[in-house]
Image (spheres, helix red, strand yellow):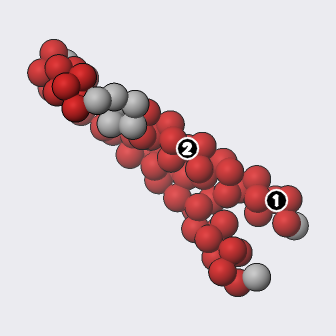
Amino acid sequence: MDALINYSFYMGLAFWLISGLINGGAAGSGDRIRAHYHATPNADRAERSKWAGKFFYLGLPGMVIGIIYLFKG
């Protein structure tokens, strides 16, 4: 059971990292992020944000389970 909970937590963490990378804020400096923001069409930005949100919500249950398990015991 412990291995399953650890696996769930790490999968949630991986989905959150993917979400951050898709959004572009996790791997760039301020100048680079501003340049990409102005060079990217609005439709592409909206699509990226939609996918980043999906990955965030996909990782949320695993993170919640891992945090509850950490504090419970």
Between 23 and 53, which is closer to the camera in this rendering? Answer: 23
- Provide the residue designation for mark 1: 4
Image: 16 above or below 1: above
Q: Quadrant of residue 8?
A: bottom right
Which amino acid type is shown beneath numbered disc 2?
Phe
Q: Amino acid at mark 1?
A: Leu
**Is residue 8 visible from the viewing direction of this image?**
yes
Residue at 76%, 82% in the rendered image: 73
Q: Quadrant of the N terminus?
A: bottom right
Q: Is residue 70 left or right of residue 1?
A: left
Q: Earlier in the sequence, mark 1 or mark 2?
A: 1
Relative horizontal placement of residue 61, taking residue 26 as reference (left or right): right
Of all residues, the one furthest to the bottom in this rendering is 72
Q: How many marks?
A: 2
Of all residues, the one furthest to the top in this rendering is 39
Q: Residue furthest left?
A: 38
* Residue 19 on image: x %, y %: 44, 40
Q: Measured from the top left, where is residue 65 in percent x and y?
A: 65, 68
- Indicate left or right for 13 with 5 as reference: left
Residue at the spot 76% in from the left edge and 59% down from the top edge = 6
Q: Secondary structure at mark 2?
A: helix
Q: Which mark is residue 15?
A: 2
Label 2 Cα crowd, 10 Å radius (few <14 / some 14-19 / many 20+):
many
Crowding around mark 1 (Cα neighbors within 10 Å: few <14, some 14 to 19, many 20+) is: few
Residue 46 image offset from top left, x and y in percent? 24, 33
Q: Measured from the top left, where is residue 43 in percent x and y?
A: 20, 25
User: On the image, which quarter does residue 69 sit in?
Assistant: bottom right
- Residue 6 drawn above or below residue 68: above
Callouts 1 and 2 close, C-beta under 8 Å: no
Residue visible at 50% across and 37% down in the picture: 18
Residue at 66 percent of width and 66 percent of height: 66
